Image: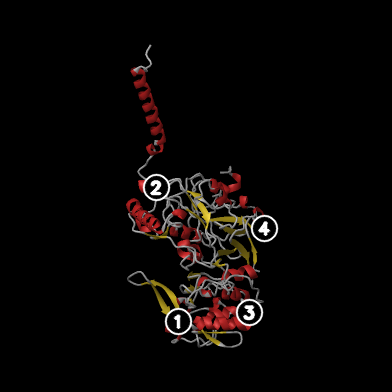
Amino acid sequence: MSDQPDPKRRVSLQILGATLGASAFAYAMEPLRAWSKDLTMEQFLQKHYKEMSKDELAKVLQRVERDTKESYGATVTVKDPKPLPGVEFGYALNLSVCIGCRKCAEACHVENNHDRRTNNSYIRVLEMDQGTFDLERGTAQYAHAVPAPGKYYLPVQCHQCDNAPCVKVCPVQATWKESDGIVVVDYDWCIGCRYCEAACPYHARRFNWTKPEIPAEQITTEQGYLSNRIRPQGVVEKCTFCLHRTREGRQPACLEACPTGARVFGNLLDPASEIRWVLENKRVYVLKEELGTRPRFFYFFDE
Amino acid sequence: MKRLLPTLLAAALLAGCGQPEQRHEAAPAPPASSGRRYPVEIHIPPKLTSIDTGKVDALGRPIRAECVSCHTARRPERLPASTAELRAFHQGMSFQHGELACGSCHVVGAQDTLRKADGTLLPMRDAMQLCAQCHGPQFRDYTHGSHGGMQGHWDLSRGPRLRNHCVDCHDPHTPQFQPSNPVLPPADRLLPPAGPSRPGFTVPRLSQEPHR
């Protein structure tokens, strides 16, 4: 009848459009509904470790220190030591002398601020029958005096593989290999999908099912952003050869705890290092060599 | 004196433990540093010069008696052939160290020294040289840092290192490690709690359980 559209129709279309727009906006903002008390805007907007500037990183380190103070009541120092130039770490373990006492696992538990309730540790010591090499038949649950007759002990931790399956499967690049050979995780970038845990042939990664429980007085206060700071719930964590210690020239905690001196750590690029002497003069092998992971963790025997 | 032992060790190594050197020529140089090297010291265990009396002082600290505090007053005519002959001192000592007898290492009238096979007398703190006479491979490995525990730095341009003495870990009279209970049992949520070892307690084997 008239060329002009019905004003009522026009208004309804506007209302419909506005409603659809509002719904779309609400849907886009949906993740915010899952906002939890544990996640601040600062954390939400935090960049990937490799993309942070020095200032941004400094702020993040301060934030982690602040959060640890709030959640755990402990005053800690979080640093971010960088890989040393001319250094590539290697670790060797003498199976002839390891007695399976698990002191290394305990030292790891303390040094790396693991959840106290689960006795978590980056080191799993397997008790194996002498003459066998089937890891599936080893047990970490032994509870008798060690060394037991007819057994030997195989401590397994992250092998810091040069061809690391865990790094390849990460969908968000939250884990990578540093220039000194250490495979690290940005615990603030990890989404907890656990692909890396499944990919690791050494079962070396751990998942934080719950928020770690540690009494304030037991927290190791000297912490590294990529290593032993208390990890949040829902992320994967792993051994970093104690990079907060080793990048300052110190020995890893597990080595210092070993009562038999079974562990040898050092710079693979230094021809005069102890680790190189072991690799050149001992019978050395790596675990699951056939997988082509090229580990930096070696096992050796005495004569 | 603390510098003396490493020097002696190095000298002994050069004299007797020369290893064929295999070096990768292409390897890059170690990190550039000021060239300063911190020392590697060897811990001197108190049990080389004193003995635990089994008593504690008012603060609960163990009381140790210096060897010479008794041995200056009493000097045995001869050393016993075995621990069974001990009457006045060190009764009940366990001894499991091959075919050795007391006199293999100890000296009558000089209880604070040890005697090497060639007759050289050593102060107690240098006992490692005595051990090295028979345990050459272990001493060689020790000298190359692959035997014996340590504390401190892997990078000696950044800090010192303290190494264990043979006697820190091995009782010279019963040098083999004695069985001990492991610490920190795993408390995996999917596994039954690992209790203390008791008769009839069987340890679940991973292979008998479903894969996780």
Residue topped by disc 3: B17
Could you tell me residue A300's position as x and y percent? 62, 64
| Image position of A223 with respect to B133: above or below | above
Q: CA distance from mark 3 to mark 2?
A: 60 Å
Left or right for A176, reference A135: left
Residue topped by disc 4: A131
Amino acid type at mark 3: Cys
Amino acid type at mark 2: Leu
Left or right for B84, reference B68: right
Amino acid type at mark 1: Cys
Residue topped by disc 2: A45
Q: Nearer the viewer, mark 4 or mark 3?
A: 3
Q: Earlier in the sequence, mark 4 or mark 2?
A: 2
Labels 4 and 1 share a subunit = no
Labels 4 and 3 share a subunit = no
Q: CA distance from mark 4 to mark 2?
A: 54 Å
Residue B105 visible, this orientation: no
Amino acid type at mark 4: Gly
Could you tell me residue B35's position as x and y percent? 49, 78
Q: Nearer the viewer, mark 4 or mark 1?
A: 4
Could you tell me residue A250's position as x and y percent? 47, 68
Could you tell me residue B2's position as x and y percent? 47, 82
Q: Residue at x 64, y 64 (%)?
A: A284
Q: CA distance from mark 1 to mark 2?
A: 67 Å
